[in-house]
Amino acid sequence: MDEAEIGDLVKVVTAGPEIDGIVFELPSDAKAVVAMVDRERGTVLRTVSRDALREREDEGPNDHALRLLIRRTPAGGGKGGPGGGAGTGPGRAGFQRAATHRTTGR
């Protein structure tokens, strides 16, 4: 595949069958996050090598479910990016004040 873009319909070439997917994110020049259907877990996001992607033209039977997964997933894959909910903020999570000195029990 020449240049993958977010939203492209792709086939992910694995050791087994080729799996239909939709490109969700391109975190680097070598990797792509793809929405695909896992037999055991249902619709999931997987990070794959861009070399494993092949372009596909036709809509697949699972594309609607994959688009729903993409729509409900926060930007940045939900791993602390902008809008992900986690990340740096004031102080430690769940605490308003710094920890005080702990006595030795004298």
Image: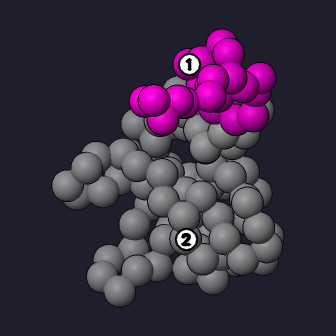
Q: Which residue is mark 1?
A: 94
User: Does dot 2 land on a helix, a strand or a loop?
Assistant: strand
Q: Residue at x 22, y 57 (%)?
A: 39
Question: What residue is drawn where x is 62% and y is 28%?
Answer: 101
Residue drawn at x 60%, y 18% is 95
Q: Amino acid at mark 1?
A: Gly
**CA distance separating discs 1 and 2:** 35 Å
Q: Which residues are magenta?
A: 85-106
Q: How many marks?
A: 2
Q: Main secondary structure of the magenta part?
A: loop
In the picture as drawn, the residue positioned furthest to the left comes out as 40
> Do labels 1 and 2 touch, CB within 8 Å?
no
Residue at image mark 2: 48
Residue 21 appears in the picture as rendered: no
Quarter of the image that includes the N terminus: bottom right
The label nearer to you, 1 versus 2, is: 1
Q: Position of residue 25 (x, y in %)?
A: 68, 52
On screen, residue 49 above or below 98: below
* 55 over 39 or under it: above or below: below
- In magenta segment, residue 1: no
Amino acid tagged 2:
Val
Answer left or right for 2 relative to 84: right
